Image (spheres, helix red, strand yellow):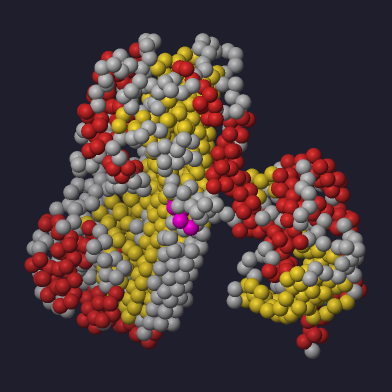
Amino acid sequence: MLTIENLKAAAGEKEILRGLDLQVNAGEVHAIMGPNGSGKSSLAHILAGREGLDVKDGSVTFDGRDLLELEPEERAAAGVFLAFQYPVELPGVNNTHFLKEALNAQRRNRGEEELDSVAFMKLVREKMELVSMKPELLKRQVNAGFSGGEKKRNEILQLTLFEPRLAILDETDSGLDIDALRTVSEGVNAVRSEERAIILVTHYQRLLDYIEPDFVHVLADGRIIRSGDKTLALELEKKGYNWITDSEAA
Amino acid sequence: MSTTAEQIKSYVESGYEHGFVTDVETDIIPPGLSEDVIRQISERKSEPDWLLEYRLKAFAHWQQMETPEWSSVHHPRIDFQKISYFAAPRKKDGPRSLDEVDPELLRTYEKLGIPLDEQKALAGVAVDAVFDSVSVATTFRKQLAEAGVIFCSISEAAQEYPDLLREYLGSVVPHTDNFYAALNAAVFTDGTFVYIPKGVRCPMELSTYFRINASNTGQFERTLIIADDRSYVSYLEGCTAPMRDENQLHAAVVELIAMEEAEIKYSTVQNWYPGDEHGVGGIYNFVTKRGDCRGDRSHISWTQVETGSAITWKYPSCILRGDDSVGEFYSVAVTRGRQQADTGTKMIHIGRNTTSTIISKGISAAEGQQSYRGLVRIAGRAENARNYTQCDSLLIGDRCGAHTYPYIEVKNPSAKLEHEATTSKISDDQLFYCRSRGLSEEDAISLIVNGFCKEIFNELPMEFAVEAQKLLAVSLEGAVG
Amino acid sequence: MNQSEGTLIRRLACDHQPAEKSRDENPWLRVLKKEAASWICDLPLPNRKMEAWRYTPVEFIDSTAFTVDEEAPFEALDPSDIEELLLPGSEWTDRVVFVNGRYAPGLSDLKTGNGMTLYTLAGESKLPSGFKRQIGQADLSDRFFFTLNNALMSDGAVIHVTGQSGARRRLELLHITVGMPDPVIHNPRHLVVLENNAGLELVERYTSLGKSSYFNNAVIDIHLSEGSELLHTRLQEESELAQHLSHLTVKLERQSHYQQVSLAAGGAWSRTDAQIIFNGEHAHAELDGLILAGSKQLNDVHLEVLHEVPNCTSREHFKGLLSANGKIVFDGKILVARDAQKTDAALNNENLMLSRSAEVDTKPQLEIFADDVKCSHGATVGELDPEMLFYLRSRGIPKAEAERMLCTAFANEVVSRISESSLRDHAKRMVLRRLASRGEAA
């Protein structure tokens, strides 16, 4: 589904990705781990189409299409979803209204029929139960005044609502306590399927106890330097990142 | 690094006096202002022709201008024909010993921690013994010379560095800029000239103390500081000791030029005589100060602590011309008695990605009136400009006034500006809390006011900050109640 | 003082004599107008050197040969003609309609009694002398346009509300301007007086039929007696070619309450000159305003909040939304007099610029002469937050739509302060219309 070849990217003068390769197929869960500053979040943001990160070389193909050519909203309609590490607040924008507009925009873009208010509310309530979110949060403004955990849950709600083909979760576990972590993971696991691919960007092993990955990659210094299965994550936990970066250097 | 205080002390002890004595004729040009007077001034200083031309051009322009009138500052009309534009140092008429000096003044000096000899010098007491002051001053000049830094008076610069002077003089504040700038350009007596060569970090903080003839700060001072590419200089102006001067009107001009990646830090602590309790005899301080961030990534910051002056009218400004340039303005202004201060800053954003920060703290006590007048202007092509402004006023007593007039003009949508202003007083709760912990009311006020001004004091070079804090305490004495 | 400026309009005022057959049968009004007409002969036209007109050009007043509508009121309109201008679902309110500055009883719908009385300046019913005095005491000083209104006014409403138990009265003061072949200047002059403990919801609207060119130079004075309360919604929906100047004075007596929500969308040149004056203690004023300035529009809000007495609170929050080459001028001053201790005043101006060629000049001011006070102001200028835009787009919302959502959120902070739902919906539509049209010129 997703093929990244020799991706090189920079933020202004600073080089961030130095030739990254990755292949993700439908039905797979990939974890990308790495020390701070390795470029994990940047990779996630580049896939979602954020400005400020310039792709210098390489290619990203999604379902046979050149992903880098598409605008952010087109990528969303194509089925790419990024759950942000720090979701921004939108004062004055009602959460329900926002979710409905977004979902319908995506459907419209894909040539699907839009949902009317009644159908939408029914759908959203179903999904809210999946993530154990309080219904009041639907009436509030998007992320404004939400606790850290509530913001993350709002992201996962969107995940379950938009049903993307490729879900990228950027440090979803950061700042969550055990219960919140469990709930969020349940939400993610609930959407695992043969047609869907998930990329988990994470620093710590902990999340992977709840969401079992098929592949684990280590991103360091702008490149994927090691790939393996879930046991790799356990080794990293024990030995730390230096173990890999040192051995790669050697 | 800086042992400014020590240096001051030793310099003073070894003979302030040298700064006063001029060997040539010490007569005064009689009061009055005319082309003739200007020619005389220029001749006395042996100035090159081009400088005389500059003065005359400014004078011609000044004659066509009207005295400015501002709505919030009131003063009796100044008779420009009654001022003498070239006078020998006033030392001759000074008291013969400290006994003859106003005890109030001495008490102030003590509170400010000024050593006895310096007190004498400041009070204008003649120092009899001849000291070898040259050695101290020479040490500084040697250090500076090694670094390639030029630091001398404008008069000297006219003789020794005429090309440099000519290139930059009046390039930031042209004589056409305003009434007092024109007057200053015509009759400026002397001032400071600083040039920092490329890549040089000036090894010490430059101060007006070290310039010979420092204490003879004339009415119409002119300062020009040029920091060439990648250089740095920190300049201190002023003195915490209350400065008296028979000359009421002070119309100085300060021009700063920062080239690529250069930084100029200009700090002022001023305590001009504010006049008696009826506001009579105080100094009128009308100054035009402007910094030109000419080069990309250049940085100019103005820090000032102003107390004193009967009337203050000054707006240190920054023209942010170079891309990524930064302008800063930090100010504490105290007004009490019948003082009036109309002060603030102008930040003009022209280049791309420019940033300006304005933090102004005003303290009004008794019947003082204080206005902050600021301008932040974002030109059409100033992409991504950023400005943050915070103006806070602290009112002590119910007869004073604090006013804020910020002008914000934006012609580019990528700019991001935030402006905030608050007005408050020292609450009875705060005072009571301090006093219940053992502080006297005066100390409590001092503590709270210092907290209020902390951000500004942090910007001052260390010794200046200490002096400024003392100055603040002295200025507010007896202000409450 | 350059007397040659403003000669056209000055001559109009100086020479203007009420026509013999006009409805100006009130001699007191005639005297007032004559005095103002002679006063204006010496007043300088506002110009850039005057602080209050620093950013706002007034060339139009000198370059346009305005006339005054001397004819009898516009009788040619009947209710069906103005259907489109009426607020949907507005049976909840009484309505007083002014067409081209004159009262149109045929289009109005007013149930008198129940504490509310309407007089008109040009009307036949006798205006109580107290009100005559209030109008006559106007301080002309150096206010050019205000004096112009005094010299040329032809009609206006005097709304008198007494304290009553029962449901609060609601009134819509609807101005409709019908374009004439030549540019006309209309000068409605209104007075609203609430007696002790009276309450009123007033909706003041300025609209037009068709796109025409005219100048509405309106004055509205409001007196709030002890304990009274006024909810004031102002909607400026003038023609895009028109000039609009609204002088508003609100005097608050002890324990009175003034709440205003305003929305300005129309006019090529529009200005509000407002003064909120606290005359009695423990009074409270709150103003929320949204200013929309789009293609070829200038909108100027000049506001003075005068705390003359202690213990009053004021809150002003104005938001500007600029598109195309729109220009906004904001000047808001809080003045606290020496004895006005325990004043609590805050003023805020936020501006959102959506295009390269827009311009904002904002100047929030504080003049504080008392010390035991809490006063603050703030001003911001910026554009749409790229973080927020990206978030919306990453969720599939197209760029234009995402921008619209954020602009609507910005505007809603003010619009949501309108409590009456049909009114609020109307305001929302005004905003949406503006956002839709901004695609024209960025």
Residue pictured at 42% horizontal, 15% vertical? C119
Q: Seen in the image, is B91 located left or right of residue C328?
A: left
What secondary structure is the magenta-colored segment mainly?
A: loop
Farthest-out residue, bottom: A250
Taking the magenta stretch, the answer to whether it contains residue C356 is yes
Q: Position of residue C167 (x, y in %)?
A: 60, 16
Say whether residue C148 is magenta: no
**Left or right: residue B250 compared with residue B30:** right
Tell me residue B80's x, y (percent). 14, 56
**Magenta highlight range:** C355-360
Image spot of residue B60 (x, y percent) = 14, 63
When the figure is inspected, residue B377 is found, relative to residue B217, above or below; the finding is above
Identified at 49% across, 36% down, the residue is: C237
Taking depth in this image into account, of A188 and B467 the one nearest to the observer is A188
* Residue B6 in sight here: no
The answer to which image quadrant residue C62 occupies is top left
**Taking the image as drawn, is residue A62 in sight?**
yes
Query: Of A194 and B318, which appears nearest the observer?
Result: A194
Question: Does residue B105 appear to the left or right of A143 in the view shown?
Answer: left
Vertical relation: B68 (above or below) B266: above
Instruction: Between residue B239 and residue C198, name the one nearer to us.
Output: C198
From what the image shows, is residue C97 above or below residue C366? above
Residue drawn at the location 36% of the way across and 34% of the way down: C181
Q: How many marks?
A: 0
Question: Residue A104 placed where, x, y %?
Answer: 74, 50
Residue A240 as seen in the image, left or right of residue B230: right
